[in-house]
């Protein structure tokens, strides 16, 4: 028998998915109008987009590769959002995670194969944790604005990586500023022959499940959710708000750092300037669009990954700029945030969590 709670949760998930779908359709329509005004065929452009994203073994694999990184950077935002914080530093945390995993992949070759790969992944997670923890420390200790600090930390991280690939980690056999290649023992195994699809997609899915389990079934996750809903009530209940804020920023940063590790260990195999084409910010958009819902983030990450991959195909096979995909992505987010479709019949009541753990409806 289906309980009322399960029905409400299913209804809420259905509402969110329909809202995302309708927003996506409307954004494609607006984008199509723009394409037609430029003299190009919107139908042909979207056909190239869909084929480039979701048709063929290689195209699907490339979409999943990009989606796995977007999912992890999205988790970095969603994890701290549950605690009432805003993490705009996923891009910087991704850079630091990539640098740490690269260093382990290059210099720790004394480790045996599988262990070398696992330690390189762990180094990426720890690097992101440290970078996110800096933001968490200033927030918890001094009450500093985490949005500004995490945003500024992005620039510091990018400049730090630039220094590393121009000096201490530079491959002296290369003209351009690249690091040395990581050892084969640190590379992620391929999952599908003839493609670049690697085990990173499994890592991302495991992290998504852990995120869901942590906030759903652990006492610490519950305390963080309470802090996110009402910090004063949490303090009154005796929760250590500062400690939880610090921990949330650390773990969130770790997820983004792991995304950077996947890009290096699974695709690039070396570190270089500007290796990330905005994965951190797009991941935040995917999490924001899904309202930090695990199932929703899996969907939006695939959609945004498909837009990224299909956008490259658009640039190669049509006269339309690949920036069209950024326009569509932005329109989807704007339409969802404006709650354009929230007045449709499937709309449900908003539920909030109180300090007792019960749910109430507005």
Image: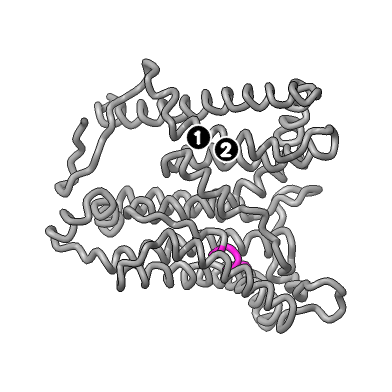
What colouring method underlies this structural image? one colour
Residue 191 % position (x, y)? 70, 51
Q: Label 1 to label 2, Cα distance in Å?
A: 6 Å
Q: Quick check: 69 above or below 133?
A: above
Residue on which the image places disc 1: 334
Q: Which range of residues does the magenta coloring cover?
A: 92-98
What residue is shown at x 50% (from left), y 53% (from top)? 206
Q: Quadrant of residue 293?
A: top left
Residue in the image at 62% along x and 33% along y? 328
Dominant secondary structure (helix, strand or loop) of the stretch shown in magenta:
helix
Residue occupying the far front of the picture: 37
Evaluate whether residue 115 shows in this view.
no
- Disc 1 vs disc 2: Cβ atoms closer than 8 Å? yes
Question: 152 or 249, which is in the foreground?
Answer: 152
Within-10-Å neighbours for mark 1: few <14, some 14–19, many 20+ = some
Q: What label sits on residue 330 in the rendered view? A: 2
């Amino acid at each position: 028998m289906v309980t009322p709670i399960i029905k409400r949760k299913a209804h809420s998930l259905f509402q969110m998915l329909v809202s995302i779908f309708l927003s996506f359709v409307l954004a494609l329509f607006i984008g199509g109008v723009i394409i037609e005004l430029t003299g190009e065929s919107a139908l042909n452009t979207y056909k190239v987009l869909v084929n480039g994203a979701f048709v063929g073994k290689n195209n699907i694999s490339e979409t999943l590769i990009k989606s796995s990184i977007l999912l992890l950077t999205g988790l970095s935002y969603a994890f701290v959002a549950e605690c009432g914080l805003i993490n705009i530093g996923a891009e910087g945390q991704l850079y630091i995670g990539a640098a740490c995993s690269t260093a382990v992949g290059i210099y720790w070759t004394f480790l045996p194969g599988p262990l070398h790969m696992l330690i390189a992944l762990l180094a990426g997670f720890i690097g992101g944790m440290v970078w996110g923890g800096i933001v968490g420390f200033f927030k918890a200790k001094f009450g500093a604005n985490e949005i500004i600090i995490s945003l500024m930390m992005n620039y510091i991280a990018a400049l730090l990586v630039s220094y590393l690939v121009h000096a201490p980690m530079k491959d002296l056999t290369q003209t351009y500023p690249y690091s040395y290649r990581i050892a084969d023992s640190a590379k992620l195994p391929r999952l599908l022959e003839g493609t670049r699809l690697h085990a990173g997609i499994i890592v991302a899915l495991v992290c998504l499940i852990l995120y869901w389990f942590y906030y759903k079934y652990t006492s610490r996750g519950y305390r963080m959710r309470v802090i996110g809903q009402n910090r004063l009530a949490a303090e009154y209940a005796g929760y250590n708000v500062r400690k939880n804020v610090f921990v949330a920023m650390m773990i969130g940063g770790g997820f983004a750092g792991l995304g950077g590790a996947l890009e290096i260990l699974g695709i690039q195999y070396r570190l270089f300037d500007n290796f990330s084409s905005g994965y951190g910010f797009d991941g935040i958009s995917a999490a924001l669009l899904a309202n930090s819902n695990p199932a929703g983030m899996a969907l939006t990450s695939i959609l945004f990954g498909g837009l990224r991959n299909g956008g490259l195909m658009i640039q190669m096979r049509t006269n339309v700029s690949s920036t069209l995909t950024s326009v569509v992505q932005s329109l989807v987010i704007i339409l969802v945030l404006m709650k354009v479709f929230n007045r449709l019949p499937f709309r449900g009541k908003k539920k909030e969590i109180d300090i007792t753990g019960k749910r109430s409806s507005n």
